[in-house]
Image: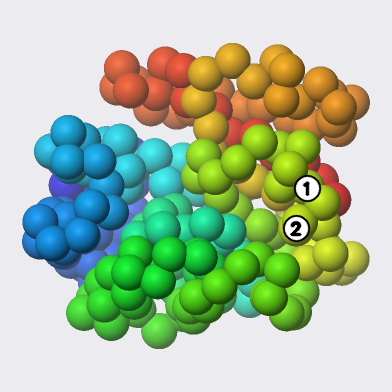
Amino acid sequence: MEHILKYFPELTETQRNQMAALETLYPEWNAKINVISRKDIDNLEVNHILHSLGLVKFVKFMPDTRILDFGTGGGLPGIPLAIYYPEVTFHLVDRIGKKLKVAQDIAERIGLTNVTFQHGDIKEVKGKFDFVVSRAVMDLGDMVPLVKRFIDSEDRNAIPNGLLCLKGGDLTGEVQKYKKQVLIDELSSYFKEDFFKTKKILYLPL
């Protein structure tokens, strides 16, 4: 919790307890199902939980905002974000059932009430959302056609509704098609750990 509290000292006692529980529950599950790379599970707090919370530094979601977490896997970034934003609703979707069961179990055990889950393809999702979030799921050019229909036309946040991706490395080729609309924000401007030197938030209004 050291790194999380360094950047998010405003967390309530409930939120602190929930975040701390993630550091026990994910390794517990990872021993049974490879949700996070076994080489990386020891870096869970920084490389996964804090990374997910990077979106908080970019935009403060208003109450009643609706978020679709596309390709959530074991619940990242959705679960850490749902802890931070108890008044925002999150719908977590993944095609791999066993990973989604991990996310469901963890959410239940820490008492999250603002998350729902859907096992299946993104094409099966119904409804409208303010933002679609993802963490290194697929190339932007492949993702935009899949998620564009979910974005509500009515904005309720400080930035227009759209797509928020957590990505790493050189994104030059990936964003070429959308370079006039896309905004790339460096996570290293918020977090000082070495892991974030190449990590970025990619925001595309839709």
Q: Foreground: 154 or 163? A: 163
Q: Position of residue 48 (x, y in %)?
A: 32, 43
- Residue behind mark 2: 147
Note whether 101 is above or below 165 in the view shown: below
Q: Position of residue 173 (x, y in %)?
A: 73, 18
- Residue behind mark 1: 144
Left or right, residue 199 beside residue 148: left
Do tag 1 and tag 2 residues touch (Cβ < 8 Å)? yes
Tell me the residue at 74%/43% (across/down): 142
Q: Foreground: 115 or 96? A: 96
Q: Where is residue 172 in the image (x, y as percent from the top left)?
A: 70, 15
Note whether 75 is above or below 50 in the view shown: below
Left or right, residue 139 beside residue 16: right
Q: Foreground: 189 or 132? A: 132
Left or right, residue 52 beside residue 149: left
Tell me the residue at 52%/57% (across/down): 71
Instruction: Give the colour scheme of this rendering.
Output: rainbow
Count the marks: how many?
2
Label 2 sits on a secondary structure element that is helix
Answer with the quarter of the image where residue 91 lies: bottom right
Left or right, residue 34 beside residue 52: left
Note whether 107 is above or below 147 in the view shown: below
In the drawing, what numbered circle is on residue 185? none
Disc 2 residue type (three-letter): Val
Disc 1 residue type (three-letter): Val
Tell me the residue at 32%/69% (across/down): 98
Q: Foreground: 24 or 70? A: 70
